[in-house]
Image (spheres, grey):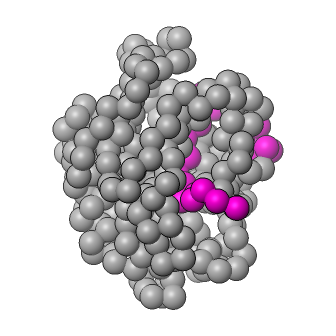
């Protein structure tokens, strides 16, 4: 197994409902991350739609995945040779239900696995989404098992513990979690204490139609402590090297690439 894993976190500022603009931003950010030597690329929750998109875009455009745009992105990912953890809404082909999901796109462009958000809000901006029913680690080389969370999934201790019991060696989370009254309040730290696993949280930034994410933080958490944290009002690619042997940071600060 290689000694160091370079993880890119796309700390992006999507605009609610601006699908074409957000897709271009995502494509540009993935290319920048690959150009900076990333092995894995993490994206924020609903990074191609914005958080409060449904009352502007509706949901008829959401298809079973991969849809044509994701298929093109898969080919691009293969050209870059990275693993992409892509947050993207999907429609279940059998039930027609909509889910807030993260897809793991492998360096050959195939979809290796996915996670559907379990702790969805049943009203407001997330009312379009049906909760997922299970959390299962995905094999993502060089690791045998990676547990995926989406934002408020970190609120329920049982989800992280279930992933650990099934062999997860590391946790990643896509998030759109703004600070404030309902902001993160120790959930990420507790998740690492409960599981003994490091957690990489790729949050978003920018102002949305209902929430201001400009102070939201992307973080690396280990043993109950935030080891790295970053916030900025503009889209940025964050890079961190993770030592796979010591299971610890190989550097003590994020490297950044402006977009």
Q: Position of residue 148 (x, y in %)?
A: 58, 45
Residue appearing at x 30%, y 38% in the figure: 256
Does residue 5 appear left or right of residue 131 in this picture?
Answer: left
Observer-nearest of 160 and 228:
228
Question: Which quadrant: the N terminus?
Answer: top left
Q: Position of residue 72 (x, y in %)?
A: 25, 62
**169 up-or-down from 187: above or below:** above
Q: Is residue 171 magenta?
A: yes
Q: Quadrant of residue 36?
A: top left
Badge count: 0
Q: Which residue range is magenta in the image?
A: 157-181
Q: Quadrant of residue 253?
A: top left
233 above or below 129?
Answer: above
Q: Nearer the viewer, residue 186 or 135?
A: 186
Residue with the most extreme right position: 158
- The residue depicted at 40 percent of the width and 19 percent of the height is 251
Looking at the image, residue 130 lies above or below residue 181: below
**122 to the left or right of 220:** right
Q: Is residue 211 visible?
A: yes
Q: Residue at x 32, y 32 (%)?
A: 255
**Is residue 106 at least partly visible in the picture?**
no
Percent x, y of residue 220: 53, 34
Does residue 54 appear to the left or right of 163 in the view shown?
left
Residue drawn at point x = 65 percent, y = 80 percent: 124
**Which is nearer the eye, 126 or 254?**
254
166 up-or-down from 21: above or below:
above
Q: Is residue 183 left or right of residue 38?
A: right
Q: Is residue 184 magenta?
A: no
């Amino acid at each position: 197994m290689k000694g160091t894993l370079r993880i890119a976190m796309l700390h992006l500022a999507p605009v609610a409902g601006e699908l074409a603009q957000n897709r271009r931003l995502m494509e540009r950010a993935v290319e920048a991350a690959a150009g900076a030597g990333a092995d894995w690329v993490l994206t924020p929750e609903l990074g191609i739609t914005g958080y409060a998109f449904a009352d502007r875009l509706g949901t008829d455009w959401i298809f079973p995945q991969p849809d044509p745009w994701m298929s093109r992105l898969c080919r691009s990912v293969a050209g870059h040779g990275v693993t992409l953890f892509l947050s993207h809404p999907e429609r279940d082909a059998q039930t027609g239900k909509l889910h807030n999901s993260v897809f793991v796109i492998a360096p050959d462009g195939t979809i290796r696995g996915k996670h559907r958000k379990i702790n969805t809000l049943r009203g407001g901006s997330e009312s379009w989404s049906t909760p997922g029913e299970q959390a299962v680690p995905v094999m993502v080389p060089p690791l045998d098992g990676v547990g995926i969370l989406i934002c408020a999934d970190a609120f329920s201790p049982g989800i992280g513990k279930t992933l650990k019991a099934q062999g997860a060696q590391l946790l990643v989370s896509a998030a759109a979690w703004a600070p404030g009254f309902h902001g993160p309040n120790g959930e990420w730290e507790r998740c690492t204490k409960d599981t003994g696993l490091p957690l990489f949280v790729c949050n978003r930034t920018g102002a949305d139609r209902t929430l201001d994410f400009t102070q939201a933080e992307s973080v690396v958490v280990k043993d109950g402590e935030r080891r790295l944290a970053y916030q900025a009002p503009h889209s940025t690619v964050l890079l961190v090297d993770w030592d796979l042997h010591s299971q610890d940071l190989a550097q003590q600060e994020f490297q950044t690439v402006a977009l």
